[in-house]
Image: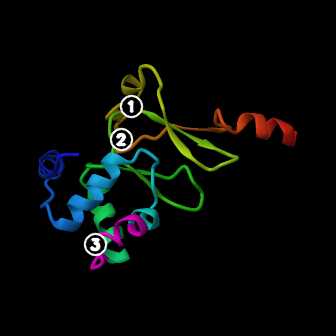
Amino acid sequence: MKTSIIIDRLQDHGIKPSLQRIAIMEYLMGHYNHPTADVIFNKLYPVIPTLSKTTVYNTLKLLAYKGAISEITIDEKNVRYDAEISPHAHFRCKYCGNVFDFPVKNLSSVVAKEIDGFLITDAQLYYKGYCKKCKTKASQLY
């Protein structure tokens, strides 16, 4: 992915680009597996040995707070991160634990900014079940 696209995205969200922020954003924009902070750290540390877990966690919090990425709380154990910020749902496989983007028609019309005087700042739609690869394995369990 071009560094200029990543820098533009950061700046569009009011985030000052740094080597670490660019690397984390680049990883998220190039990997659609909804990684955790630990996964991101473990993938980037060999390339950026000065990177700390604290920097990764703080950067992810900043990116999410500024709206450059989404935090996904579909997994009861870990927060996951997604660079795709357009309205979409997520699906978590109960067998393998992978999280997938899940298209839902007209989801953007459901995600309102204000309902009955409540200001909506985040809306998440999750599905759980068995992915295409695991549904046969899962059916053997029942």
Q: Helix, strand or loop at disc 3?
A: loop
Mark 1–mark 2 contact, CB under 8 Å?
A: yes
Instruction: Say which of marks 2 and 3 sits in front.
Output: 3
| SS assignment for the magenta stretch, majority | loop
Q: CA distance from mark 3 to mark 1?
A: 38 Å
**SS at mark 1?**
loop
Residue 10 appears left or right of 126: left
Q: Residues within 10 Å of mark 1 (few under 14, many from 20)?
A: some
Where is residue 62 drawn, in percent x and y?
27, 62
Percent x, y of residue 24 = 29, 60
Nearest-to-viewer mark from 1 and 2: 1
Q: Return the disc, 2 or 3, that comes first in the chain's sequence.
A: 3
Give the Cα distance between marks 2 and 3: 37 Å
Figure quadrant of residue 99? top right
Q: Which mark is residue 48?
A: 3
Front-most of residues 104 and 124: 104
- The residue carrying mark 1 is 111
Residue lying farthest to the top in this orientation? 105
| Quadrant housing the C terminus | top right
SS for callout 2: loop
List the residue tagged with mark 2.
Answer: 120
Give the x, y percent position of residue 88: 42, 33
Q: Nearer the viewer, mark 3 or mark 1?
A: 3
Q: Are marks 2 and 3 in contact (CB under 8 Å)?
A: no
Mark 2, other Cα within 10 Å: few <14 / some 14–19 / many ≥20: few
Give whichever of discs 3 and 1 has the lower sequence position.
Answer: 3
User: Does residue 6 belong to the magenta stretch?
Assistant: no
Kind of residue at badge 2: Ile
Residue at image x 42%, y 64%? 37
Mark on residue 19?
Answer: none
In magenta, the rendered stretch is 41-51
Kind of residue at badge 1: Val
